[in-house]
Image (cartoon, grey):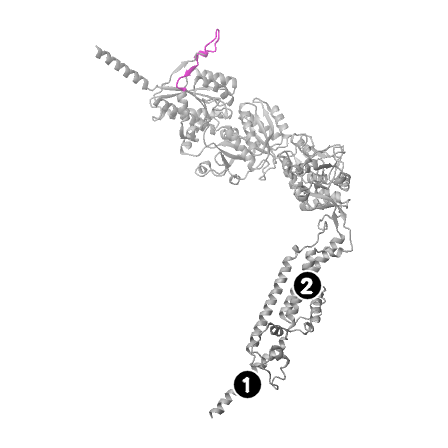
Amino acid sequence: MGADRLLVLCLALAAAAAAAGQRPSAVSVGALFTYESTIGRAAQLAIELAVDDVNADTTVLAGTNLNLITQDTNCSGFLGTIEALELMEKNVVAVIGPQSSGIGHVISHVVNELHVPLLSFAATDPTLSASEYPYFLRSTISDYFQMHAVASIVDYYQWKEVTAIFVDDDYGRGGVSVLGDALAAKRARISYKAAIHPNSNTDVVSDVLFRANMMESRVFVVHVNPDTGMKLFSTANKLRMMASGYVWIVTDWLAAVLDSSRSSDRNDMNYIQGIIVLRQHTPDSVAKSKFISKWNNMARNRSIDSALNSYGFYAYDSVWTVARAIDRFLDSGQQINFSADPRLHDSNGSTLRLSTLKIFDGGEQLLQQLLLTNITGLTGQVRFDSDHNLVQPAYDILNVGGSGSRLIGYWSNYSGLSVASPEILYQKPPNSSTSAQRLYSVIWPGDTTTKPRGWVFPNNGKPLRVGVPNKPSFKELVSGGKGPDNASGYSIDIFNAAIKLLPYPVPCQFIAIGDGINNPNYDDIINRISTNSLDAAVGDFAIVRNRTKIAEFTQPYIEAGLVIVAPARRANSSAWAFLKPFTVEMWCVTGALFIFVGVVVWILEHRTNEEFRGSPRQQVLTIFWFSFSTMFFAHRQNTVSALGRFVLIIWLFVVLIINSSYTASLTSILTVQQLATGITGLDNLVASALPIGYQAGKFVRNYLIDELNIPESRLVPLSTVQEYADALNRGPKNGGVAAIVDEMPCVEIFLSSHCKFRIVGQEFTKEGWGFAFQRDSPLAADLSTAILQLSESGQLQRIHDEWFTDPICGSEDSGLGAVQLSLGSFWGLFMVCALICTLALMVFFGRVCWQYSRYSNSKADGEPGAAAAVTTAVVAEMQPSKPRPTRLGSFKELMQFVDTKEEEIKKVMKRRTSEKDNGAGGSSHGRSISLA
């Protein structure tokens, strides 16, 4: 009995296991789209073909038929939501769609509750995120990537502002929001947003375009639906907004329209010539070609007029993605079961039938199988990232022209813009650098290949609001009056001249900032630009770091570095002024060198030159006379030795340098002005504790405090030229200032009428003045080009000469505070001279020693000493001499040898050589007689 029970239990368990592993005969999958729409017509046939292919493939869902249930959303958010709820009543395990991003937001809440994965092939709104809708998967490319592609195109052509024209729904608003962020990353922006209601008529569209055309940007990014889009371009053509100078960048909706239109139906092509269009990139393949052929045959059999577009490929791949996920789901032993949601029940009298909505029990497992998808479809690799978006998004970039469009490049999030297909780039390391970005040439609206500027002055009747500082002084630079055009000065003339060079008219309204009594704060004027109270600022505005963060500056039109101005006085002369050029050390060393050179020349010339011989008194006088007469090149003694002449040449060069330096220094001391305060440059000005003046309202104050760390208590604000002069005249002891720090053009104006003050030191900053505009304003770049044209044509200099008079006082500081010449300026020259003299003496004494050695070796025994030999050379043969030492044995005899004329020494040595030869001949003759 127990065995029978055990057998029955085993059979029951086996039957249950068999039932659990059995696949269902059919699985229902829903599809949501608008049948009669550009995307819907392509998707409907593609989905049906995909279902047929799946059911015909025995390797997928073997034994299980994929049942497709479609619902028409009718291009209506409300009706689409109702249709979606009706679809959920039919126990579908997954939904392909919806086509609309708006319906996607609504139905995503439903599938989250019912655990039914939603796979959309056309809802591109980037706000449909996985974090909010975990059961939503996007099997097409998100507009997040499309808007980054648009931003890359804008950056590639160096445009800074765009006008966004978008449909005012979830799809349009979500895309434009991402576009703003993407442009900001490229330092560009959306300058105007033109929203169009989804069901707007032609009049509404015309009004939106008219207002957009009044703005300054000529780069339009169009992100609408197909129904509104073609109506928009027809209206833009009537408003002449498709002419030269305009740029139109259109998202992928237009590519879908163009691809879906038959050649004979493209009557609207004339309206869209020259625009740039994005289209989802799908790589070419054999499978893609076969699918296109099958789709066309089915469309022809059903008399469908439209053609296939890229959304059809994504719809086809979506069906295969769902089918393979269900296959893996069933292979894992999961069952397709639905259960009631206790929270969904019909209230009394309700006809909504909420209780018919069931929860898919295996929804979580099927979702995980979908996220594990990694197949190659018609659109390329089908694989999802953590945000439930497709990996490797890419776009074709098309340029519409003639009767069709041509490919000018690609965009991918892997390498940005390129002319090589993404499939090729995926095989290489990513390279999104600026230099690697490239597109083919574009034929722009107006049938031109010249890149549009992308910007014009806004045609809204509002002039450019230009702020002008109104201050009490330095009106040569800028002067603002009460009227809108009552502004004058150097800066105003340059601005007006540059505006005239622009290729478009720019009406301006000058707005005076300040009361004309006190200087306005220049940083406050720049801040008004950043807060949109002003459009520009013209005047003596220095281009400094903190201002460039909030405003856009043009190229500098004048250099305006900071300099120091200090009072100067005429130096008092004295009876001993002629001694001031040299210091005491310099005088002593110069005198010693004169005597040293005189002694050297005397030594070198004494043995050969009669003019350097005589009595001791006479020779001492010769040394001093020769030395100091060379100062005036008036020496009368001639040098005959080579060494003496060489030393004299070097010495005369030294004397020339000394004379020139002395003359220049003495002239400077007797004529220049001396600094009254002792300030000679930036370093000792900063190190001192003296008060410093600066022009009120300018950036100088912040520079002195922040960069040079000068206490604010030392700084004295000044506004007018007269205040400058008064403060410098009073000086630091009488409530004035020791020096003023200001920009060079202002200092030039001040010094042109005040000769008692001078520039001290060098210009210690290198700022320039420029015109300020709002950040990323194209006017700044255009005016920079105009300023360069003014400079190249010479007009910039002519305007400068008209306003800046020639200063009465020079601005060079070479004559300020002339100082004595010290030994430090000449020690190198003196050292060279002394070394040459020493070298000459060494050569001279070496030569003397050599002569002395020869003379000693040639002297005969018993011959008188050197001095005696010279004096008795004539009678030496006639009178016998007394015995003498055979060698010169004393220092006295050496000195006598040196003192003897070189010519006489040579004669004695010659005579001795002759005597030796005669003596040798006589000895040989005697020996011959003796032998005989």
State the residue lying farthest toward the top.
348
- SS at badge 1: helix
Could you say which disc has been placed on residue 767 in the image?
none
Q: Position of residue 419 (x, y in %)?
A: 49, 39
- Region of the chain picked out in magenta, as a range: 344-363
Q: Main secondary structure of the magenta part?
A: loop
Could you say which disc has been placed on residue 594 in the image?
2
- SS at badge 2: helix
What kind of residue is marked 1?
Asn
Q: Position of residue 375 (x, y in %)?
A: 40, 30
- The residue under label 1 is 918
Q: Position of residue 157 (x, y in %)?
A: 57, 37
Q: In the picture, which quadrant includes the N terminus?
A: top left
Pick whichever, 216 or 612, lies toward us: 612
Residue 459 falls inside the magenta stretch: no
Figure check: 781 above or below 647:
above
